[in-house]
Image: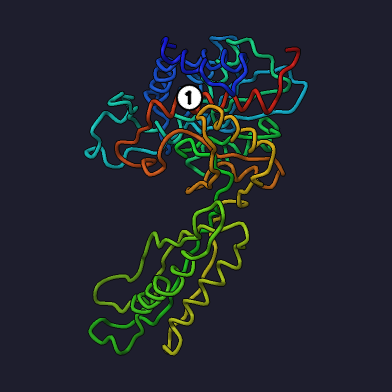
Amino acid sequence: MDKEATEDIMALKDLSQLEKKVLSHIDEAEAIAFLQDLIRTKSISPPGDCREVAQVYADKLRADGIRAEILALEEIRTSALGYLGNGNGPTVALHAHIDTMPIQEPDQWNYEPFGGEVVDGRIYGRGSGDCKGSAAAQVIAALALKRANVELDGTLIVAGVADEERHGEAGTEWLREAGHLVPDMIVVGEQTENKICIGERGICWLELTVKGEGAHGAMPWNGVSAITGMARVIDALQKELMPRLASKKHPYLPPSSLNIGTIEGGEQTNIVPSSCTIRIDRRIHPDESYEGVRKQIEDVAQAALAGIAGISCEVRVFHTGGARVYTDPDAGFVKTMAGAARDLRGKDVKLTGYMQGSDARFYAEDGIPIVIFGPGDPKYGHAPNEHITVAELVEAAQICALTAMRALGLGGQ
């Protein structure tokens, strides 16, 4: 760490001397270099092969004497877990996924997608924000605690997990069910611009099918077009349901939402289509049920089609994102992390909610405090020119280190 950064840390009046010592071991150049290593080690999903990146993750921990192991339900979907502490108290997990999305639009990238280039204080590359930036920050935090000889009164697990981009069955879900990652408190790394998020909306994917009556395209009056019927349904969803959802408020979460992601209908140009199907992504608040969401959409669709002879519709749920995530803002772990951020920044921290979905859902019904937190703006995830700032990467490592110290306490110090 350079002299100016060290002086800035020493000037922080709300930190203990030991906390300042820990932060002095968080080096910007090392954090950048490690994130670059993670970015340059491809782990695109599909196929979701994380064997090499999990090895890079584990090797970084082992180089400083931190015990690490590589675990997998499926051969290529490997996760790496590191352990620090005396094991006498509770367990805090710092969790981040190490698989990434593919490069859909290579011509729109200004920099090599797997180059990890640093330009104007930003680190570019696929996975820089989603979610290797969080993984790097969490590992750097653990290394700082180790190098400062901090004895945690409990266990800190840093977990670089596979399979998040494929719904997590062979990653976090398996690690939890197999007993490998069952913490008492967890930070789930995602792109939050280092905002402390205490909840996320649930995911409900639905399929809505309108059925009509086929006929020859030259005589459309002999049939009933399912596509025309679907147009009425879509219009009703946009004009009636979407505004109602946008007005549904929650103190920490974005509004409920509805997105029509795909549409399929008809067989060929000269046939009146007898079927048309849309698929809907519905994000829901903790007080909404999956069946309630399905019924709500069905009611709007049936009303839109009322009075049209020979036409019908059905709505089914084909995927859910598990339980909705919400942690009480007064939970001790939330206050601990908010306090760490406040003492580092010198100003109060406003809690918020996460826009997208994450592996936090696998712990939503475990009764443990969950915080979603990490460097990077979520709008750049899955997008060309994905990046995070160097400043957020370093700050995330600092906040994670302070949070682990304060949440677990110190043994023998």
The answer to whether one can see residue 59 in this image is no
Q: Amino acid at mark 1?
A: Ala
- The quadrant the N terminus occupies is top left
Point out residue 130 in the picture as x, y percentages from the top left corner: 43, 36
* Res 215 quadrant in image: bottom left
Q: Secondary structure at mark 1?
A: helix
Decide which of 100, 400 is in the foreground and name it: 400
Query: From the viewer's perspective, is residue 180 above or below residue 225?
Result: above
Point out residue 183 in the picture as x, y percentages from the top left corner: 69, 33
Residue drawn at x 58%, y 29% as measured from the top left? 340
* Colouring scheme, one of rainbow, by chain, secondary structure, one colour: rainbow
* Res 110 quadrant in image: top left
Return the residue found at the far right.
88
- The quadrant the C terminus occupies is top right
Dot 1 surroundings within 10 Å: few (below 14), some, or many (20 or more)? many
Q: Along the horizontal axis of the image, is 2 left or right of 113?
A: right
Residue drawn at x 54%, y 18% as measured from the top left? 58
Query: From the viewer's perspective, is residue 272 above or below residue 32?
Result: below
Decide which of 131, 271 is in the foreground and name it: 131
Q: Along the horizontal axis of the image, is 356 left or right of 367?
A: left
Point out residue 29 in the picture as x, y percentages from the top left corner: 40, 15
Q: Along the horizontal axis of the image, is 280 left or right of 400?
A: left
On the image, numbered disc 1 is attached to which residue? 136
* Res 37 quadrant in image: top left
